[in-house]
Image (cartoon, grey):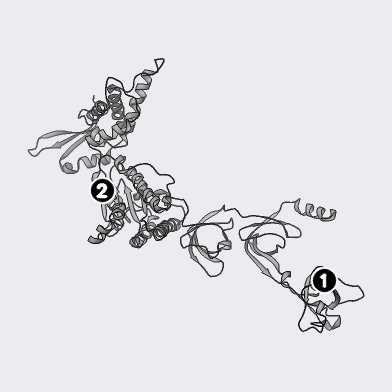
Amino acid sequence: MTTNQTDTVREKTMYPLGLATVVRVLSRRPVPSPEKLGRKGTLVKIKKDSKYFGLHPEAAGVGEVIGSKEEEVGWAYVQFPTGYKNRYRIGLPLAQDGTCDLELTEEETEKFAMAIYGGQFMEFCVIGFAVEPGDMLKLSRDPLSVVDVEKGVASGSIAFVAQALDGDMALVDFQGNRKTVFAGKFAGKLEPSGKVVLDASGTVIIGNFGLEDDSFSVDQATQVSWDDICGQEEAKNRFMDALEKPIRYPEHYQFFGKKQPSGVLLYGPPGCSKTMFGKAIFSSITATCAAKGAKASQGFILVSGPEILDKYVGVPEATIRHIFARARKFFEKTGIRPVIFLDEAESILAKRDSGISSDVLRTIVPAFLAEMQGVRQSGAIVILATNKPESLDYAAIREGRIDVKLRIGRPDRKAAREIFLKNMKNVPISETTTSDKLADTFAEELFSEKRVIYEIQREGAAGENTTVHFTLADIVSGAMVPVVVEEAKRLALERELSKPQATEGVRPEDVVSGVESIYRQSFASDHNEALRDFTHDFVDSIRGVKKLTQAQL
């Protein structure tokens, strides 16, 4: 590059550069004008209708224009690979009657980029640059020309493919609207309901996640097995019926014509193992996928209801279609039934026209139901997890869509004891006791009738008033147990800190204090739903409910 050229480039790029997004790359042969044909370095060949065609064998093939003479207006000299050179007419209108002997070769094809600049479509010559749709052209201001190219980065707004159109166009759902965009370098590679990234102008696709993106996926095995869930035997068996037994005993299922469930409703009080079931299901899917060499994160789609909601109407519906399309593709590819686990299902599937749901849900619920209608064809098992089954729209949980309804109840004394022992693994205990004795102490204290939260006055059959106690045992959950264990460990640690070295572990009194701490904390919360379940069978005879203000020891 000469000094003058360097100065020109420096002058062009010293000011702020304009940016244009490439939507198409075009190649076309330029118009064979006299100016182009007479330009030094242009590659040409003799036209078949020229009087010079075939006249000299040395002039066959492609030649290069090497210049012209000032006194020979309308002529250009061409040199061929054989070394032969001669002059030829270039079609100048005022010379030689405008006759032209030359034409441009395919090597002279020029490359242009159609790009968006300032909200308008413009064409830029990009000869010498490697350009593809989605790239950014850096433009000098005066004259407006390309000085550099920045490769496209998949950073922009998310959209979902509605339909791949002919050519390099696509129909996408973007921020609640359906619009046509340029597919760019992903033309022919887009999948219906696939997730894509649009550039800043929202006009061209610059990234394609398709149906195998990792959103709503669990990356690592949770190492939770069915045995880790204490109690809940019926629920565990029903899930194994749906996920594992059809793979272990395909002939038996075929013999009986047994259909696998397409949907399961998992409901019950908070903290009672619904999340544990989700982890165990993922572990089961992981084991099945490992045996077939499939990717487990694509076979278990974990969705929290609020994650689907969006400020733009139409985006949640597109997300739902994307989720089911992912499940459908996974089943077609692997033959393994994927699981769509929807936690907090009431947030998007609440009853319509009941005052519970918002106007947004009037479109989300039908979209979800439409996808569930074809869930058997997709092979997916839809699991709805909720603490409020009464809030769900009936159409979402009716037979045919949700075949199995499982209540995950509160742990009883035996189950709570087992959960306690699992949480006490690797926890040091005092030599004066054993793990079993600590578990017995825990269960006794947790289910003690002395830990009263509400006093309920009810009228008996003979008209007399009786008092019924609502106790800590009536709000027990699996999530409560680790909290008690952590509190017992804290108390034991505080005691041992006074010694040069810790020598004694958890004592029974630490466990009792842990339960007492949970009991006192329970007074800070309302337990309306648990109270409603507790009084369900005698609600008509209730004469008064009193919440205690001090823990009863």
Horizontal and vertical percent position of residue 28: 68, 70
Q: Quadrant of the N terminus?
A: bottom right
Check disc 2: other Cα within 10 Å, few if <14, some if 14-19, many if 20+.
Answer: some
Cα separation between marks 1 and 2: 84 Å
- The answer to whether one can see residue 399 in this image is no
Q: Residue 496, how many percent across, how many down? A: 37, 18
Residue 35: x %, y % from top left: 81, 72
The kind of residue on which mark 1 rests is Val
Residue 62 in view (yes/no)? yes
What residue does disc 2 label? Answer: 237
User: Relative to residue 163, is residue 137 depicted above or below?
Assistant: above
User: Does residue 420 appear left or right of residue 87 in this picture?
Assistant: left
For the residue pair 319 and 127, the one nearer the viewer reads as: 127
Task: Assign a secondary structure to mark 2.
Answer: helix
Q: Quadrant of residue 536?
A: top left
Q: Nearer the viewer, residue 234 or 195?
A: 234
Q: Examine the rendered structure and indicate whether residue 36 appears above or below residue 269.
A: below
Residue at image point 8% right, 39% down? 461
The mark found on residue 65 in the picture is 1
Count of numbered badges drawn on the protein? 2
The residue that appears at 29% across and 20% down in the rendered structure is: 431
Q: Residue at x 44, y 46 (%)?
A: 219
For label 1, the crowd category at 10 Å Cα-Cα, with few meaning under 14, some 14 to 19 and many 20 or more, is many
